[in-house]
Structures are given as structure tokens and as C-alpha cells.
Amino acid sequence: MPPIINVIIPAYNEEASIAHVIKEIPDIVSEIIVVSNNSTDSTESVAKHAGATVLKEEQRGYGYACLRGMEYIASKELKPNIIVFLDGDYSDYPEELTTVIAPIINNDIDLVIGSRVKKLRESGAMTFPQIFGNWLATSLMTLFFNAKFTDLGPFRAIKYDKLLALEMEDKTYGWTVEMQLKVLKKKYSYVEVPVSYKKRIGVSKVSGTIKGAIFAGVKILSWIFKYSFA
């Protein structure tokens, strides 16, 4: 029996991109869940028209949106086997979802990170704060935990039962690194797979602003040091 796969897409004002993302997600996915993170544009109506389940989360923050998606899934009678997280800005290639979930299906891996490797990355797709922040965070995880991560990429897949066991709590910018740190602490299996990456549609709410980049950096580092000295 094939696994049940749900996709969670946090989205804040992504009306220009969200339909492209939804339409390019492979048919093997049972349900696409778009969590509108207090959007003020037509993100919700566009996503619904494209075939997604649309939820609302008024508290601004990436983690808030992800947790809202998880809350909805927990209320469903038929639970998924795999959860895929994907951004709504069309910077990822949704059709590569099959590549991202393959290690879970074929090798029983718990967590798979889509690594935005340079050779598959469009020039300018990642800002300097993103590149430096990824390098610093993953280097510190290597130093403190002997981790093999090279990216904090948001395109990722995880077994649903393992995701629940992580007891995720970050509400904003630290969601991705919290997940990876908790996987390391619990000694779950993980791998990275190379994924393509292109310039997003619109302006990033995190790396596109100095304030967002600073807040994200502080949150990511705080999670790493919290777990390093716990």
C-alpha cells in the first residue's frame, strides 16, 4: 500500500506564486494544505481554486503556520505517513517532491532535507545572509553534534510519527533548525538530497529585509546554543 503523503505550505501574500506551486506537486500527494499566515492579498482564494485545503493562521510566523497545519492533520481520521514542508514562493521545484521522499520510502529514513546545492541553484536565488547563515548554522551543528547537514532548506520530508515525537514548538524563524536539532538529539536517521532552487516570485519576508535576516539569525543561533549546552 503506498504511503499517505500530506504537504504543508506556509504562505504569506503569495498570490502570484501559490497556484504554480500547487499545480506542480505530484499526484501521489493525498492532500495539499496551504496555511495562509494572515495574508492580505488573494493567496487564500487562489490556493483554494488551485485545489488546496486552505487554513488561516492569524499569528504571523513560519512556525505558527506549520503548527496550524499540523493541528489540522491531527484532527483528521486518516493520518498521513509522510509530511512534506514546502514554501509557497515557487523558489523550489515542487516536482522534485518524489526525490525528497524517496529515502523515506526506499530506505526507511526518518527525515530528508532538500539541500540547495550551488550547482543546482540559480544565480542570485539565495541572498548572502541566507548562504552565510546556512554555513554558520550547519558548521555549528557539525561542531557540537557531528552533524552532516549542509542546509536548513525548507523543502523537507519527515515521517509523521517522528514529527509528532519531536514536539515542535518554535513559532517563527527557528522552525527548520529546531527540527534538525531535535532529530540529532533523538538520533533519528536523516539524509540530504540535492534539490534545484530558483529566484522566488516576489520579495522574501525574511532574507529580503535586514530586520528579517537579523531576527532569523538570532533565532537560529539561539536554538543551536540552547541544545549545545543543555
Image (spheres, rainbow, N blue to C red):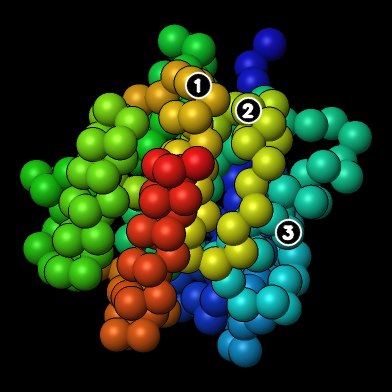
Disc nearest the viewer among 1 and 3: 1
Tag 2 secondary structure:
helix
- Which of discs 3 and 2 lies nearer the camera? The answer is 2
Q: Tag 1, which secondary structure?
A: loop
Q: Mark 1 — residue? A: 188
The residue labelled by disc 3 is 68
Q: Amino acid at mark 2?
A: Lys
Measure the alpha-carbon separation of dots 1 and 2.
8 Å
Q: Nearer the viewer, residue 120 or 174?
A: 174
Measuring from the top left, give residue 171's x and y in whole percent.
Answer: 61, 64
- Where does label 2 land, which residue? 162
Q: Amino acid at mark 3?
A: Arg
Mark 1 and mark 2 lie on one chain; the one further toward the N terminus is 2
Question: Going by the image, does 147 lie left or right of 68?
Answer: left
Q: CA distance from mark 3 to mark 2?
A: 17 Å
Q: Residue furthest bottom?
A: 40
